[in-house]
Image: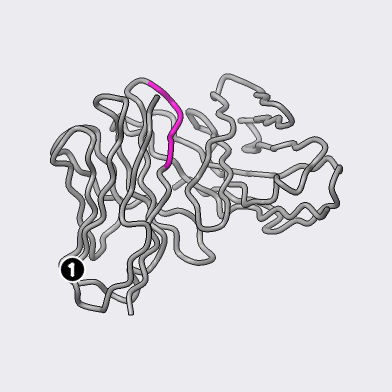
Amino acid sequence: SQTIHQWPATLVQPVGSPLSLECTVEGTSNPNLYWYRQAAGRGLQLLFYSVGIGQISSEVPQNLSASRPQDRQFILSSKKLLLSDSGFYLCAWRGRGAYEQFFGPGTRLTVL
Amino acid sequence: KQEVTQIPAALSVPEGENLVLNCSFTDSAIYNLQWFRQDPGKGLTSLLLIQSSQREQTSGRLNASLDKSSGRSTLYIAASQPGDSATYLCAVSAAGDQTGANNLFFGTGTRLTVIP
């Protein structure tokens, strides 16, 4: 069966510090991968998606970047965090040719 | 751009009641619609997926319907239980997406509380 992991589960970082969040998927090959952010009181916002290794598309201009160094690994990064980067970050995957998206447990990021 | 709205934002019902959650979307050219459940501080759990060619899907006490032409979907929960308390989100993907990504557009959710 397929599983999706995210770490860390929670993170508190000072403004201006770097960020690296990791997402890995097991039990599938060549999935589509997604990063979403859920801010307090707001809906999910798609940040990045990837249809293959090294292929990253950004949905919104922002202080963040994403990379996909391996088929089932998706990384969300920032060089200098802003207060507005606080939120709940969710990684998701979808099987090639399938329809459902499946989500990871999320990372709660607080920028102080 | 697709906009997804869920009304009401919050709903409280006594245990045992049947209830309906609503979802509307502005662009009827969708590929599919997915209902999710989110418990506080947790990720999303997929409940039901309806293809654009389908009218409804059922799973246990859950039934989701889709009226694509009017841009509406409902999630019916029968005989509600306290364990059903969560936020319910609907999301649609756009037809004709050439990227192959099948990106989802989400509503802001309905927070359901089932009172014992």
Question: Looking at the magenta stretch, what is its main secondary structure?
Answer: loop
Please state which of residues A77 and A22 is positioned toward the viewer in this rendering: A22
Q: Height in image: B78 above or below A90?
A: above
Residue at 66% over, 22% down: B55
Q: Height in image: B98 above or below A38?
A: above
Q: Is residue B60 magenta?
A: no
Instruction: Assign a secondary structure to mark 1.
Output: loop
Residue at 50% over, 32% down: B29
Please state which of residues A36 and A57 is positioned toward the viewer in this rendering: A36
Q: Is residue B111 left or right of residue B90?
A: right
Give the amino acid type for the residue marked by disc 1 in the picture: Pro
* Range of residues picked out in magenta: A98-103
Query: Which chain is disc 1 placed on?
Result: A
Please state which of residues B85 and B33 is positioned toward the viewer in this rendering: B85
Residue at 54% over, 65% down: A41
Q: Height in image: A31 above or below B11?
A: above
Please state which of residues B2 and A44 is positioned toward the viewer in this rendering: A44
Residue B93 screen position, x and y as percent: 46, 35
Q: Is residue B59 left or right of residue B100?
A: right
Residue at 68% over, 24% down: B58
Provide the residue designation for mark 1.
Answer: A18
Q: Quadrant of residue A30?
A: top left
Residue A76 screen position, x and y as percent: 24, 54
Count how many numbered circles sit on residues in the image: 1
Residue A42 screen position, x and y as percent: 51, 62
Colour logic: one colour
Q: Is residue A64 left or right of residue A108?
A: left
